[in-house]
Each structure stands twice: as structure tokens, then as C-alpha cells.
């Protein structure tokens, strides 16, 4: 069984500042890792994913995440956030069979001017 | 039009009532899922279906049942609603082939059980 820990329930940050949202996972097998974003009053959307290959993955809107196997982490970063990045971010893990996703509890990113 | 739709979007009901939440998709995906979201708890899987004849329990299936009426439709029922089933419910879909496939989420149904 897998589990996901998102250490911060809320991260307040000023616009144009850098941000890191932390995610650690636990699994006895190799995993696939995902970040989903939920904007206010909407469903979740895939932000980026790690399946294999390069440990650094990027999204189209400037976010990136690095898979660190030794630390069992998949932290999400952005060098300069915008007001529009205000949302809840969920880290998720699946096993290689990709039967289901296990989600973390979410981190609310609050960007203020 | 949205690819994954959920009805109703909001529902208030009373304890003991039977309620059905419906999900439809036009993406042609085989796999469908039901999650509930509670503040501070993230998303938890209730049931999932890999095709019309395949139904599986998720992490928190007690008190819920599902029906996969067709490839495009997956309904979630609460036979006798209770207040701690008050939550935001999401349906999601994904394809079967390949690996690490994205799940596509509906807009959610906000259910309140009084």
C-alpha cells in the first residue's frame, strides 16, 4: 500500500515570490507520482507527473517537481508565483499497475499581492 | 460542453433518505471513479470501475453503492444518508491503455445531509 504526506496544509506567499510545496510518499514498490491542482469551485486538473526517466518534470505554467527516490519526495516548486496560482494542490501516488491513485491531504497555496 | 458531468451539483437531504449522484462522460474512457473530498482530508476513493462489468471497492465504500449502467455512466448511491456523509463528491475517468494516465475530474457535487 502507498501513502502520501503533504506536510503543509496552507502556504501563504506574496506574489512574485518563490514557493515550494512539499510531498513525501511511502511505498514498498516503485511508484508513479502526480501533482493535481484544484482551483476554487472546480474539479482537479493534472499539473504534472513523474513516470520514469528525468527526475525533473515541468508543467506548462512554470511549476516543476523533482523526484527524489532516496528521500521519497516529490516537492513542487515555482520560482515566481502569480495571484492566479492560488489554489489547492494535491500530491498523488500510484503503483506500477496504476490501478488507483492515493492522494495526500492537500496544500492550499494562498498568493497575496 | 464538459467532458465529465455530474448531477446534481448541489443537494441538501435529510438523514435516512436515499440519494443518487450521477456521473456521465463523453471522453470514451473505460475507467471511472468516485471520490469524496473533506476539508483537511484530501480525496478518498469510494468505488472504481474499470469497465461495465468490473466494480471495485475503494478505501471508504461503507454506506455507499454504485452502478455502472453503461461505459459512459457511473452512479453513486447513499442508501440511507447520514450527516457524516456531508462532503464534496467527485467523479473521475481515465483510459485503460498505457501507463500513468491522467484522471479527468468532473466539477463535483456538494452534498449536505441534515
Image (spheres, coloured by chain):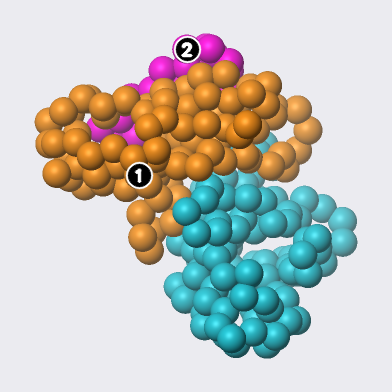
Chain colours: A cyan, B orange
Residue beneath the point at 36% across and 60% down: B39
| Left or right, A110 with reference to A35 | left
Image position, residue A61 (x, y; %): 77, 65
Name the residue carrying label 2.
Answer: B69
The relative height of residue A16 versus residue A23 in the rendered view (above or below) is below
Q: Is residue A40 magenta?
A: no
Q: What chain does badge 1 belong to? A: B
Residue B34 is tagged as: none
Residue furthest toward the right?
A: A54
The relative height of residue A30 versus residue B105 in the rendered view (above or below) is below
Question: Local crowd at mark 2 within 10 Å, few (<14), some, or many (≥20)?
Answer: few
Classify residue A91 by image quadrant: bottom right
Quick one: A98 or B31, which is closer to the camera? B31
The relative height of residue A73 versus residue B108 in the rendered view (above or below) is below
Image position, residue A54 (x, y; %): 87, 61
Image position, residue B91 (x, y; %): 49, 35
Q: Quadrant of the C terminus of chain A?
A: bottom right
Q: Secondary structure at mark 1?
A: strand
Residue B43 appears anywhere in the view = yes
Residue beneath the point at 37% across and 29% down: B21
Q: Are marks 1 and 2 in contact (CB under 8 Å)?
A: no
Quick one: A42 or B83, which is closer to the camera? A42
Q: Single out the mark in the foreground, 1 or 2.
A: 1
Name the residue carrying label 1.
Answer: B110
> Across the whole image, how many numbered discs are drawn on residues?
2
Residue beneath the point at 17% across and 39% down: B82
Image position, residue A32 (x, y; %): 69, 51
Quick one: A85 or A105, which is closer to the camera? A85
Q: Is residue B60 magenta?
A: yes
Question: Local crowd at mark 1 within 10 Å, few (<14), some, or many (≥20)?
Answer: some
Segment tinted magenta in the rendering: B49-71
Amino acid at each position: 500500500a502507498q501513502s502520501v504526506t503533504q506536510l503543509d496544509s496552507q502556504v501563504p506567499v506574496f506574489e512574485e515570490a518563490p514557493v515550494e510545496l512539499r510531498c513525501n510518499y511511502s511505498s514498498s514498490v516503485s511508484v508513479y507520482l502526480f501533482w493535481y491542482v484544484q482551483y476554487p469551485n472546480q474539479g482537479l486538473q493534472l499539473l504534472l507527473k513523474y513516470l520514469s526517466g528525468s527526475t525533473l518534470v515541468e508543467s506548462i505554467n512554470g511549476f516543476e517537481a523533482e523526484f527524489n527516490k532516496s528521500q521519497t519526495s516529490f516537492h513542487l516548486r515555482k520560482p515566481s508565483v502569480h495571484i492566479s496560482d492560488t489554489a489547492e494542490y494535491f500530491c498523488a501516488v500510484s503503483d506500477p499497475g496504476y490501478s488507483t491513485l492515493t492522494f495526500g491531504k492537500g496544500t492550499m497555496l494562498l498568493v497575496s499581492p | 460542453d464538459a467532458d465529465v458531468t455530474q448531477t446534481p451539483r448541489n443537494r441538501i437531504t435529510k438523514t435516512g433518505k436515499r440519494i443518487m449522484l450521477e456521473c456521465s462522460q463523453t471522453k470514451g474512457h473505460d475507467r471511472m471513479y468516485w471520490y469524496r473530498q473533506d476539508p483537511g482530508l484530501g480525496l478518498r476513493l469510494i468505488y472504481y470501475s474499470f469497465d461495465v462489468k468490473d466494480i471495485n471497492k475503494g478505501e471508504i465504500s461503507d454506506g455507499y453503492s454504485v452502478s455502472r449502467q453503461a461505459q459512459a455512466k457511473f452512479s453513486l448511491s447513499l442508501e440511507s444518508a447520514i450527516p457524516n456523509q456531508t462532503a464534496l463528491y467527485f467523479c473521475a475517468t481515465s483510459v485503460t491503455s498505457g501507463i500513468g494516465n491522467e484522471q479527468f475530474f468532473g466539477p463535483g457535487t456538494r452534498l449536505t445531509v441534515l
